[in-house]
Amino acid sequence: MRRKLAFTFIMVAAVLFALAVYLLVLMRNNGKEYQQRILSQQGYDTSLLAFRRGNITDRNGTVLAYSEEVYNLILDPSVILYTSNPQKPEPNREATVDALVQVFGYSRDEINAILDEKPDAPYVRFARQLSAEDRDRFLQYQTEYNTAKDKNKKKLHQDKVTGVWFETEYKRMYPYDTLACTVLGFSGAESAEGHWGIEEYYNSSLSGIPGKVYSYISPEGDYESVTEAAVGGYTVVSTIDYNVQKIVEEEIANYKQKHEYKNIGVIVMDPTSGEILGMATDKVYDPNDPMDFSAVVSDEELNAMTDDERSALQNSVWRNFAVNDAFSPGSVSKELTVAMALEENVIEPDTTFYCDGSETVQGQTIHCHKLEGHGAMDVTGALMQSCNDALMNIASRLNAPTMLKWQRLFGLGSRTGIDLPGEATGILFTEENMSLIDLATCSFGQGYSSTMVQMASAYCSILNGGYYYTPHIVRQLLDENGNTVKTVEPELVRTTISESTCEFLKQAAYETVQSGGGTRAKIKGYTVGGKTGTAQKYPIEEHNYVISFMGFTPAFNPKLLVYAVIDEPEHEDTTVSSSSAVELERDIMKRIIPYLGIPADAATN
């Protein structure tokens, strides 16, 4: 047994010895090759390169938002403090700190504190969003310092300015400051995420793809890197016209100087396509600095706010009243009620009514705005005088399912699909809960709620012959080279009413401006159609109103629609007039018409 064990031990030892000799020979002949193979398989972390967020332009190419290249100043303490000579610790520290202080004016104590706190850190972001000029000034200083020589061509400085580099980032810029702020929204620099408006809705299109830098050891043992370039986001070409938008905002600003109110909204549309040419509210902020609320509250008030109060403030300033809020539309909806009745054949254009100032429905008296009554009138007269009594009579010939069917057909009570975030739906009755009283009040725009964009889109279908288009605010997406990636064509969703009904309603709207409740909307040389609106807000006893005017021109071949809404305007009585909304709409339209080149179509008006 001992001999067998000894023999086995000798054999194992011989094999191990032979293997050791073989490995030594292999390492001597091929060691460098194997070492390079092992090193080449060692992975290194990749670093990301920022992408450029796409531009937003108006319909004519005017840039409303773009991304400017800026630079983050990065400190590498592990390099700044590195020394290969123990006798001379941190040889480059003083030169590098001096450079940062002299070029940028940074605090020497702050820089030294970071170096002491994080001596081994390879990456410390010290400053953000420096300009190219700032970066170049430092790089020039660094080059001149590190390469400086005396007259004998000997280096002046044994130490170096080192361990400082610049990381590319992009800063979102809005060259026209507050213009179209509630339409554009805003975007943060680091996250490149859009918030509100086009920036949010089209975030995935505006966002590009980050680039990458891969670092590795090559098979030859060399340190190498490969850069995968970032891909920029698409340019979003909006339907907004810069000049139309500017006119709308200027006229809202003029109104603000003279009147008190809660909210204002204006929509300018092309009724033939559903394109939004202009959209604005009275709420104004600068997307370049969206957290600046100094125009609304003082710094003391802002600092005293709770988180919930601050959030409510942000929401009130950033939201788009024309899209995000629903309210009772009031009398502008009367044309819709007449359209329903004509299409259902329960009235004819020459049907007459008698207004005695009120109607009693299920024991409840509902008044016309003219308490003494309008007397006898036909359908056109009912619209011209905005008679609630006549409209309630018309509604009595319908029923709840029919009223609701047509409201839905006109797009009320559901999102229009406009390409902006946070669209409200509004609230309609249902077949089960709509009473006869509700049917009566709905006929003149009370009891349900809709948004501005819903009502404007419904009107467009009346003006273009009965075609309901999805309202939209973007026309095209372009790549970095200007090539068209996508074209947003007008989207026909459905037909609403017959052409004959459309023609009747346009004529009635024209008569309303000529000699009815909308005479203040007249513009010399042009046929203008329109409908006033006044809706009482709940609770009724507070006597708050929403007033509005829906105007269009030319009256019989409309190319332009302007819808102006004023929420809770100042008033001294328990009733309120829609006249200031009419005047706001007129002042806007009067300036837009010549800009768009709409030809005059009436010698006098």
Image (cartoon, helix red, strand yellow):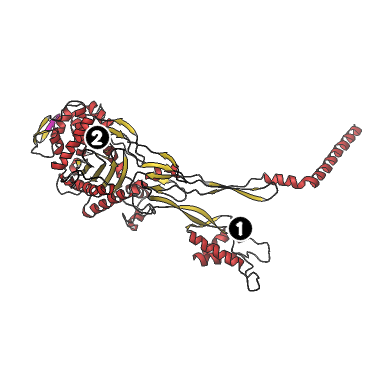
- Residue 554, image x and y in percent? 22, 41
The Cα–Cα distance between marks 1 and 2, rounded to whole angstroms, is 71 Å
Report the number of discs. 2
Q: Tell me the number on the disc at residue 88.
A: none
Residue 461 is a magenta residue: no
**Amino acid identity at mark 2:** Ile
Which residue is the extreme one toward the bottom?
Answer: 151
Above or below, 27 against 464 in this view is below
Magenta-drawn stretch, dominant element (helix, strand or loop): strand
Residue 360 is a magenta residue: yes
**Residue picked out by circle 2:** 462
Identified at 67% across, 47% down, the residue is 218
Task: Kindly indicate the quadrant of the structure image that contains residue 235.
Answer: top left
**Residue picked out by circle 1:** 78
Which residue is the extreme one toward the right?
Answer: 3
Which quarter of the rendered picture does the N terminus lie within? top right
Please name whichever residue, 336 or 421, is drawn nearer the observer in this view of the structure: 336
Residue 256 appears in the rendering = yes
Residue 106 appears in the rendering = no
Residue range (magenta):
359-364
Please name whichever residue, 85 or 351, is drawn nearer the observer in this view of the structure: 351
- Residue 190, image x and y in percent? 47, 50
